[in-house]
Every structure is written in structure tokens, then in C-alpha cells.
């Protein structure tokens, strides 16, 4: 197979060099197209009736020669149209050059008028053409394409060319963030930008990427959250509603719901609590579902759910107790380890916080959602305000869809003494070797001592888009990180 590809490349390269000897530009800088193929398709009847000339450009997806007639399919973006090149209308020399030197996958520009073939196909009768880009390698075969998943992701540009449905996913993904942004702006939230390189990584528990700042001669980290501790500083500064959409980085394993680089959104809302946040989050999810997907009903990853249904509340402690027999507020580490082994859960948890999380992850797989997971143990939520009604738990919720957490919000801890105590506990975890424990940010504690109003914070990422699309996170990422091929 490789020899065939090399042979075809050599043949195409020979054509390119021959075109150059004839003075034909093979990679000109500009196209003179005045219409998109999609515009021609939509307005075909009017263009045909007016006999108006159009100039379109695109990639040749199909080429068939029948004596003095050549038919090609020209693709511009996701839309295609047939073009017809007749020796009579084009001229013998231009017709011959096209037939001899132009191949499928080449980018060309054509000028012509709209007509309908005797077989009833809407087409453009070409009166002139020019080459825009000579392809030295062919596209994958139409029916076989790129069958290997690694190859598809590595050569995403080919994967998208071959599959319009994949193109549609990324158009929807762009709209997903557009709808989110507009929703928040319409409700008075200010879009902000916070640092992506930090001295300490706050706002989440994850292993960060580490690098070195040459000018300051200090080690720094790529952020693991979308500016949580920075946006809360803005609450103290007097801003009442802020949000950011941006990239986060976590140096941890990959899974259908985890990548090392991803896009998330976080917003912060002063003078609101997690009950207010639940209402707003549900409203936002419904807005996304209707505007991006045109429905609230989804079938994804073996789960069926309707976002328009009532969102049930699931008590963290009760759910784990019912499913495993373990009370996460009172059980010992030995009891938790024994239960995890009994359940067949592979876990390298070395402290109580991680063990609780592993037990919950075992339980969540059977929950289709939509649901709010509430009353998390205080130990596993170091930035959340403790519940006055349920001591030992916090005012926090996670949105559960498809057996996963697809959104996270809580009443923010604004008690500096409590925050200092929790950061000290996280510091001990770090010193004990827990790479995912939260780095204490003592400057943040000082900010709290100056005073921060009651605040609610919430975030979600492209994991939500993946779940609603019925895809893995990798599949809805344009260019996921890939291991280099071995030479």
C-alpha cells in the first residue's frame, strides 16, 4: 500500500513540475472567487434564470471524463456542487490541461454559469479555471477512509474532509460556547481573563504541568482551573458577576472524560448561594440543549435522559451508604480500603479524601441524570462553605449526566480562618505525596481577611458538550495531544 502512495505522489509531483514549466502557477496567493458553493446551491434557480456568471473555489472530490466532457464534484466547506468542463465552452487547450494535470484533492477556482444537466443535476458550466493548490497526496478512499482511530486523530484535517458529520460536531461545539457566553452576558456577567501561568495552582485538585520562568528564575505551573481564586479576588474588588471561558491543563491520565488540555467555563456571582446557582445552571443547560442540539432529550453512552425533566437531588453520603454500606463521614480508612477491594475498584488512594472519591465514582456509574449531587463531605471540598444544616458537609452540588459529573458549583468559602485551616490540611496531603492535593494560596487567604462577599461559583467544560453529543472528550477536541510516531 505504501508503494502505491509513493508512486502516486511521484506522478502528481511530475504533473506539478510540468505545470510550472508551462508558466502555470501551482500555489497562487489569492483566489478571485465571488461566491461560496453553498450560496450557489441555495440560489441556484435565480442564478440559472439570470445566467449570471459566478466564480467559486474548492477541492475536487470526484473527477470523471467522458470524451469532450469532464465532470467534477467541487467541495467548498461542507457543501458540494457538480462542475462541467466542455471542450467547446472551455477551449481545447484549457480542457486538455485540466484533463491531464488536475487530480482529485486539488484545489481549483472556476468561473461559469448555472445549468441543469439532462440527468437533472444542478451544475456549473465552466468557462475558465485556474489551479489554487496542487495536492501531492490523494485523499483517503471514500468508503474506507481512515479506519484507525489514532490515524484519524493524528490527521484530523483528512478526517473532517471525509466526514461532514464530524465537521458538524465542531460547528456545534463553537455554538455551544457562543450560547454559554451570550447567556451569561445577557444576565449581567462580565467576561474576564485571568492568568494561565501561576505560582500556585488553585481552584481544583489535580496534578499540574510544571515549567520554568526564565526571567524571574522561578518554577511556575499551568493553571488547572479557570481562574477560580482570581475571579474570587474580583468579588472582593467589587465586581459582582464575572466569567471566563478558557483552557486548563492537568498532568494526569486520559479517559473518555479526561484530557490533559481542555476548555472550561467558570462564573462567579456575589451575594448568591448554591441554591441560586442550581436554578441558573439548570436554565443554562436547557438553553444549550435547545439552541445547540434542538432538543432536551438525549441518548448518550448507553443512557437516556431529558433535561426538561425534574432534576432530582442525590445525597452524597446516603448514595454511597446505600450502594456500598460505607458511611463516608464516619468510616475508617481501613474500612474504605477493604470495601474498595471487595467492589473490585482499582484505586491507588493513599488517604481518606481519595478513598471517599473512589467510592463515589463507583456509585455514580448507574446514574443517568439529570441530577444534582449534594451534601458532599467537607474533607473533599476545600473551597466550599460548610453547611449549617448538615454539619460535616458543604453547600455544593455537582450535575450528574451519563454517570459522570458534568458541572460543579458551590457556595464559596469566605471565612479566612476556615480557609487557612483547610489549606493547612491540603499542605499535609501534598507533603505526604498526594500529587492531586490543592496547593495552598496564602495570598488568597490574605484577600479573604480583607473581606469577600457571599459568593456562588460554578463551572463546566467541554465534557458537557461531549456527553450531549454522545462522544468522548477526545472525539470533540479538534487536535488532541498525540504521542509522536516512532520513526
Image: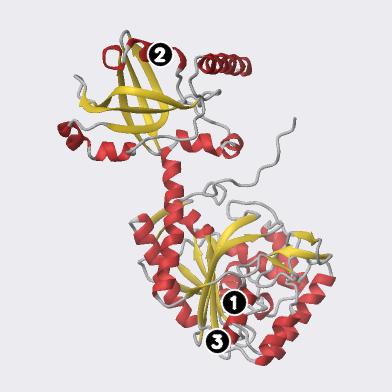
Q: Position of residue 46 (x, y in %)?
A: 17, 37
Instruction: Give the residue pinned by disc 2.
Output: 99
Residues at circles 3 and 1 in contact by the CB criterion of under 8 Å:
no
Left or right side of 360 for 485: right
Give the secondary structure at mark 1. Answer: helix
Q: Residues within 10 Å of mark 1 (few under 14, many from 20)?
A: many
Query: Which numbered disc, 3 or 1, marks the residue closer to the eye?
Result: 3
Q: Residues within 10 Å of mark 2 (few under 14, many from 20)?
A: some
Compared with 443, 451 (above or below) is below
Left or right side of 442 for 110: left
Instruction: Give the residue pinned by disc 1.
Output: 231
- Residue at 28 percent across and 33 percent down: it is 54
Residue at mark 3 to residue at mark 1: CA–CA distance: 11 Å
- Residue at 68 percent across and 59 percent down: it is 250
Give the secondary structure at mark 2. Answer: helix
Name the foreground residue: 28 vs 355.
28
Instruction: Give the residue pinned by disc 3.
Output: 238
Residue at mark 2 to residue at mark 3: CA–CA distance: 69 Å
- Residue at 31 percent across and 30 percent down: it is 81
Question: Given the current orientation, which residue lies at the most extreme front position?
Answer: 23
Compared with 251, 41 (above or below) is above
Residues at circles 2 and 1 in contact by the CB criterion of under 8 Å:
no
Residue at mark 2 to residue at mark 1: CA–CA distance: 61 Å
Q: Position of residue 183 (x, y in %)?
A: 40, 69
Compared with 359, 294 (above or below) is above
Q: Position of residue 41 (x, y in %)?
A: 27, 36
Name the foreground residue: 108 vs 258.
108
Amino acid at each position: 500500500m505504501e508503494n502505491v502512495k509513493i508512486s502516486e505522489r511521484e506522478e502528481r509531483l511530475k504533473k506539478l513540475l510540468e505545470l510550472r514549466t508551462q508558466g502555470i502557477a501551482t500555489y497562487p496567493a489569492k483566489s478571485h472567487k465571488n461566491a461560496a458553493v453553498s450560496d450557489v446551491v441555495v440560489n441556484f434557480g435565480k442564478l440559472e434564470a439570470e445566467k449570471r456568471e459566478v466564480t467559486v473555489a474548492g477541492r475536487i472530490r470526484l473527477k470523471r471524463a467522458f470524451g469532450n466532457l469532464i465532470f467534477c464534484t467541487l467541495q467548498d466547506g461542507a457543501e458540494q456542487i457538480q462542475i462541467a468542463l466542455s471542450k467547446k465552452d472551455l477551449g481545447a487547450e484549457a480542457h486538455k490541461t485540466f484533463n491531464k494535470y488536475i487530480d482529485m484533492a486539488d484545489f481549483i477556482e472556476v468561473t461559469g454559469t448555472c445549468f441543469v444537466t439532462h440527468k437533472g443535476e444542478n451544475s456549473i458550466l465552466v468557462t475558465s479555471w485556474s489551479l489554487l493548490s496542487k495536492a501531492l497526496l490523494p485523499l483517503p478512499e471514500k468508503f474506507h477512509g481512515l479506519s484507525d482511530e489514532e490515524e484519524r486523530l493524528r490527521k484530523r484535517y483528512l478526517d473532517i474532509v471525509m466526514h461532514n458529520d464530524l465537521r458538524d460536531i465542531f460547528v456545534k461545539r463553537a455554538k455551544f460556547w457562543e450560547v454559554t457566553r451570550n447567556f451569561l452576558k445577557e444576565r449581567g456577567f462580565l467576561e474576564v481573563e485571568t492568568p494561565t501561568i501561576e505560582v500556585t495552582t488553585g481552584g481544583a485538585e489535580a496534578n499540574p504541568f510544571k515549567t520554568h520562568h526564565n526571567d524571574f528564575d522561578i518554577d511556575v505551573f499551568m493553571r488547572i482551573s479557570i481562574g477560580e481564586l482570581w475571579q474570587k479576588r474580583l468579588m472582593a474588588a467589587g465586581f459582582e458577576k464575572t466569567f471566563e471561558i478558557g483552557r486548563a491543563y492537568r498532568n494526569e491520565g486520559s479517559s473518555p472524560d479526561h484530557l490533559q488540555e481542555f476548555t472550561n467555563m467558570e462564573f462567579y456571582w456575589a451575594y448568591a448561594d448554591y441554591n441560586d446557582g442550581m436554578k441558573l445552571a439548570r436554565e443554562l443547560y436547557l438553553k444549550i440543549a435547545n439552541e445547540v442540539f434542538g432538543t432536551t432529550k438525549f441518548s448518550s453512552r448507553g443512557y437516556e435522559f431529558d433535561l426538561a425533566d425534574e432534576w432530582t437531588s442525590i445525597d452524597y453520603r446516603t448514595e454511597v451508604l446505600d450502594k456500598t454500606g460505607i458511611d463516608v463521614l464516619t468510616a475508617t480508612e481501613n474500612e474504605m480500603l477493604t470495601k474498595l477491594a471487595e467492589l473490585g475498584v482499582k484505586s491507588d488512594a493513599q488517604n481518606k479524601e481519595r478513598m471517599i472519591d473512589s467510592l463515589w465514582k463507583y456509585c455514580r456509574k448507574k446514574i443517568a441524570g439529570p441530577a444534582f449531587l449534594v451534601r458532599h463531605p467537607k474533607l473533599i471540598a476545600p473551597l466550599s462553605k460548610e453547611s449549617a444544616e448538615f454539619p460535616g458537609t458543604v453547600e455544593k452540588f455537582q450535575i450528574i449526566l451519563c454517570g459522570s459529573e458534568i458541572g460543579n458549583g458551590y457556595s464559596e468559602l469566605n471565612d479566612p480562618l476556615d480557609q487557612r485551616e483547610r489549606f493547612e490540611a491540603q499542605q499535609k496531603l501534598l507533603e505526604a505525596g498526594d500529587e492531586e492535593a490543592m496547593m495552598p494560596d496564602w495570598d488568597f487567604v490574605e484577600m479573604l481577611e480583607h473581606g469577600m462577599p457571599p459568593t456562588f461559583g460554578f463551572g463546566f467544560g467541554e465534557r458537557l458538550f461531549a456527553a450531549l453529543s454522545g462522544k468522548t472528550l477526545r472525539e470533540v477536541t479538534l487536535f488532541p495531544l498525540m504521542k509522536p510516531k516512532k520513526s
